[in-house]
Amino acid sequence: MNSQTRQLSNHAPQNSQLVEQEEKRTDLGFGTKLTDSKIRLVNQDGSFNLVRQHGSLWDRLNVYNRLITMSWVQFFSWLLVAYLFTNTLFAGVYMLTDPSTLVGIADEKLNGPFWKCFFFSSQTLTTVGYGHISPNSFLTSSIAAFESMIGLLAFALATGLLYGRFSRPLARIRFSKRSVFAPYLDVNAWMFRIINTRPNQLINLEITATLTRLEPKGDGTLTRKYYPLNFERSKVSFFPANWTLVHPITEKSPLYGSTPEELEQADSEILISFQALDDTFVQSVHTRFSYRYDEILWGHKFRPMFDGDQQTRLDLDKLDETEEAELN
Amino acid sequence: MNSQTRQLSNHAPQNSQLVEQEEKRTDLGFGTKLTDSKIRLVNQDGSFNLVRQHGSLWDRLNVYNRLITMSWVQFFSWLLVAYLFTNTLFAGVYMLTDPSTLVGIADEKLNGPFWKCFFFSSQTLTTVGYGHISPNSFLTSSIAAFESMIGLLAFALATGLLYGRFSRPLARIRFSKRSVFAPYLDVNAWMFRIINTRPNQLINLEITATLTRLEPKGDGTLTRKYYPLNFERSKVSFFPANWTLVHPITEKSPLYGSTPEELEQADSEILISFQALDDTFVQSVHTRFSYRYDEILWGHKFRPMFDGDQQTRLDLDKLDETEEAELN
Amino acid sequence: MNSQTRQLSNHAPQNSQLVEQEEKRTDLGFGTKLTDSKIRLVNQDGSFNLVRQHGSLWDRLNVYNRLITMSWVQFFSWLLVAYLFTNTLFAGVYMLTDPSTLVGIADEKLNGPFWKCFFFSSQTLTTVGYGHISPNSFLTSSIAAFESMIGLLAFALATGLLYGRFSRPLARIRFSKRSVFAPYLDVNAWMFRIINTRPNQLINLEITATLTRLEPKGDGTLTRKYYPLNFERSKVSFFPANWTLVHPITEKSPLYGSTPEELEQADSEILISFQALDDTFVQSVHTRFSYRYDEILWGHKFRPMFDGDQQTRLDLDKLDETEEAELN
Amino acid sequence: MNSQTRQLSNHAPQNSQLVEQEEKRTDLGFGTKLTDSKIRLVNQDGSFNLVRQHGSLWDRLNVYNRLITMSWVQFFSWLLVAYLFTNTLFAGVYMLTDPSTLVGIADEKLNGPFWKCFFFSSQTLTTVGYGHISPNSFLTSSIAAFESMIGLLAFALATGLLYGRFSRPLARIRFSKRSVFAPYLDVNAWMFRIINTRPNQLINLEITATLTRLEPKGDGTLTRKYYPLNFERSKVSFFPANWTLVHPITEKSPLYGSTPEELEQADSEILISFQALDDTFVQSVHTRFSYRYDEILWGHKFRPMFDGDQQTRLDLDKLDETEEAELN
């Protein structure tokens, strides 16, 4: 380390316009370098397109999160597999010690000694303990004492996982498959709409949207830029029916004057962040979504979701229905 | 898609007064189109008058939320029904295989083989496993091994549900049945009051109210409008006794100069949103309420809730008591 | 209802100075009418002095909150009582049906049929089910099937309660028994100090204090007034050791120029509200406290809590230690 | 107490410049007196260097927090120890009463009466209750009835602890081992970077940093001062990859013009506070970290963490990689 690097900032300017510019730049956390047009930033299920290497095995397995977020069918299948595996394992251990010390029932009744050990294991693991098979030696008694403890802990774990799955705050918000550029009052607007697919109430909803597109820097290389899109109304207290989000295209909008070709060329994507409060458990719920340039319909508008004249019958199947409408 | 719709906003005005007006409009999320005077927006239990169609079966059943929010009597009845149903089901399965392989007790002692199977099932499901009935074949042992796993998971589920029911943040706020227009200082005020029916403490309370009424648009059709109502005090730190909310009717109030007839004609409703922090678990609690025009008493005031002269004896039964009072 | 009361606000002034004054008044939720000098507003354990009448029995019992907040000794005693009571109840039911249908062990071994029924009940309720006593009739089998379900639900309940007790966010903040008026820089200050008695970390701490005192109104009757007291520092990020809260007595302070006699005459009380984030579970914790006029030492200052010269040995027992100090 | 101390503030100045200065001082809660250069304020695991004396035994043991925060190996070891200990204890009690009243199996099969008692205890505690050993007297039946209740409560406790361990919001943020002074745009900057080692998403991230250093007071004694360090960007919405925090060294920075020698002499330490929202359970996560003067590399910059040209392959092992870079 020479003296030049040790004395910090002596030759540096006192103020820097570049730093000020950089501080004003909007960034959601993706940075400016993701310029590969084949990759969308946010998938429609809210995940990111990123491969992570060399994390610890445990972190990569991420067992708890997977068990919480997998489907119910997968979850119960894994529980069943774990139950059968553990019983097979302990049955093997009893076989290795001495199956004849598990007494009380003739082996042939249960298709031989292995299955006797297996069923004894299952009766121990679940603590059902009928006692028609029972351990008759010090060694098998010890193993059974250990197994019954393991069994209780395993079901304690299952209890926690089941509760975690149930109580997890989960907004079942459905976004319309496409967003539209539609006429709106005396201008045009970019719109999409959402519904809550579950009957429980969401309150204090808030949505933000950010347009991201590639722009050439001075040297011709592409850099990714981010622009917030303001909605006519980005917060509501209640969410009884559907909610159409409206970004009016006025001079202030970064979308002002754009064409479909421009949006495609710039690999445009609109990132959406949703949050609300679930009323049942008063928990925050968060959701991400995104519309790419090819998920925007030009000169279309949404059809009403209410059933005919009735203002209080909401038809959830009509979420994605649009019709052509001439832009202003 | 013709070239006109593809070029966005070129002929649109650069700024729009209509957009600006729309952006300033208050809206809680109900929109402007609910103009049917037979329907109130918020019921007094906080629910909305909306029928939802075509959701997925699972979302419509909404099992978890129902099990959490139903009454305790209903909840335990459902548990008992599920228990009896599961035992009957497994008893049927044991009957189909071979009830004679469940050995240890004479069938006639328990009113025949079906009930032997039923009680064996219950002893397996709850893992009580006395062993005076025990499975004596490979098939019944397998079924019993599966049933005991199901049993443990089911009671794990019940544990989670019970905890969910208990730990759910629930404000037992009672609103006075009617609100009043009462004299207040040298003006009048719209008032209602609330109590906490439970002895646990609520802190950091906050209440907002919104007047909604139908107003004719330029073309004579009705549109729903929303106006915030300011309280003299809308936040308090502690809630030891009752709390009377006071909206003074001064020139700034949207209620200034109104008559009962006007409120009725405009299908007026005042929507109330309450939030606080439960002190025991430091959880947020939220409640909705509403007063319609016909739930407002004109020229009445609330009677004190304290018992005689004693400033520290609060009589919860006096919440709704009012008396006539001449308006200013 | 006459026409006079129906036309609202017509004769009322358009603006009201009284309303504006009232809106500016500070109030924590206690109101202005608690003027009984025998009653303090907030007890030092954070509770309020208020008797509530006529609530529903269930709300008054408030079983869940009591089970969560009672001491561990009380909690386990109640569990034991409930266990013995339930077993006695079911033993009675088995006695009423026919104890001779519980077979497998001679009555005299267990001090007669009642105790045989009692122990059978306990083995059923806990699902231990040894089987050396077993139900040998339809009726006792049915009761046992029901009891084992009850047993599992009861222990599910106990699991939930135990977890609720453990996971409840609880700040074990200890406030110094007395607060002091001490010299501070070139003025005086009102001070108190707090420690966290548990080794787990609290972060993002925030404290507010409000002076409340009785003041005569124009007509000579007493009314309760509230004044916020500003601390030199009311928020800190970390709380590694003790924290001394300092309210400097400058001209801006509502305590400026007061004497002990004045504070006593005005029934003065300083209400304190504390909140922080527990680092282990990232839960909010809240605490209330109060110092009355007779819990303030005049001309005293706190002694350091560190052990001799060592800046990193905090002696929790020194929290309340003060010494005389001449005021500026 | 003389009359001088009773009359508060009479001779004190009405306004105090010292008080105003003190109010403007930044303090995280460590105070000004920690001037021992051997002690860092925050360890890199987020803990503080403070010994606490004389707390209550229960508070010092802090059983719940320890059981929640210890490693899984330690946790399961403690459970096993507790299980063996409890069984040994109850085995002792059964030995003291009369082991011959536990009937059903010959003592010699299980290595003598003690082990018979031990295994009977384990079958009772876990409620497995085979029944091949069963209590044949009033006294042993009573003890067994008590033990099975204890067993269920103990496993209820274990259930709660397991769930608490799993559901605890825990940010597995890894900070780069060293921070750097690197060239940045046309100035220099102090930088460090972080990754999320787990695949679950963090959203709404926020980081603050505070420089603390010793400075001489007027009388030559050292006092600890705190200065906030502003990042070019201290909040992001998403955290898909790594995040490099950049504090530009312009005139406004408290680090402007410093040298390594100065930082060392002043015992400088930069304290970092991180918070975010875990997306799976929508829980807040908080982390503390700190870099001391000797954990800052001068004239180094971070190497990219992406794998070659691929913008979407993040190599977590490259977090700490830096290379020399000449400062501006």
Image (cartoon, coloured by chain):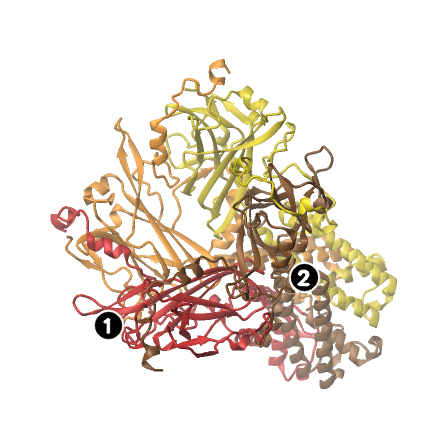
Chain colours: A orange, B red, C brown, D yellow
Query: Which residue matches tag 2?
Result: A124
Viewer-proximal residue among A312 and A12: A12
Please report the residue visible at 63 percent of the width from the left and 38 percent of the height from the top. Answer: D48
Dot 2 surroundings within 10 Å: few (below 14), some, or many (20 or more)?
many
Q: Which secondary structure, mark 2?
A: helix
> In terms of secondary structure, where does tag 1 sit?
loop
Q: Residue at x 63, y 78 (%)?
A: B116
Instruction: Give residue C60's quadrant in the image.
Output: bottom right
Q: Is residue A121 above or below residue D284?
A: below
Q: Residue furthest top?
A: A3
User: In x, y percent, where is residue D212?
Assistant: 55, 31
Most foreground residue, D35 or D294: D35
Gap in Å between the C-alphas at discs 1 and 2?
A: 63 Å
Q: Nearer the viewer, mark 1 or mark 2?
A: 1
Quick check: can you spot residue A118? Answer: no
Q: Say which label, 1 or 2, has the lower sequence index.
A: 2
- Read off the chain for label 1: A
Mark 1 — residue?
A: A309
Residue D116, position as x, y percentages in the image? 81, 60
Q: Residue at x 60, y 41 (%)?
A: D11
Query: On what subunit does the disc labeled 2 rest?
Result: A
Where is residue A170 drawn, in percent x and y? 44, 57
Q: Quadrant of residue C149?
A: bottom right
Q: Is residue C135 left or right of residue D323?
A: right
Percent position of residue B166, x then y = 56, 66
- Total marks drawn? 2
What's the amino acid at mark 1? Asp
The kind of residue tagged 2 is: Thr
A266 left or right of D186?
left
Q: Is residue A321 left or right of residue B140?
A: left
Q: Quadrant of residue B111?
A: bottom right
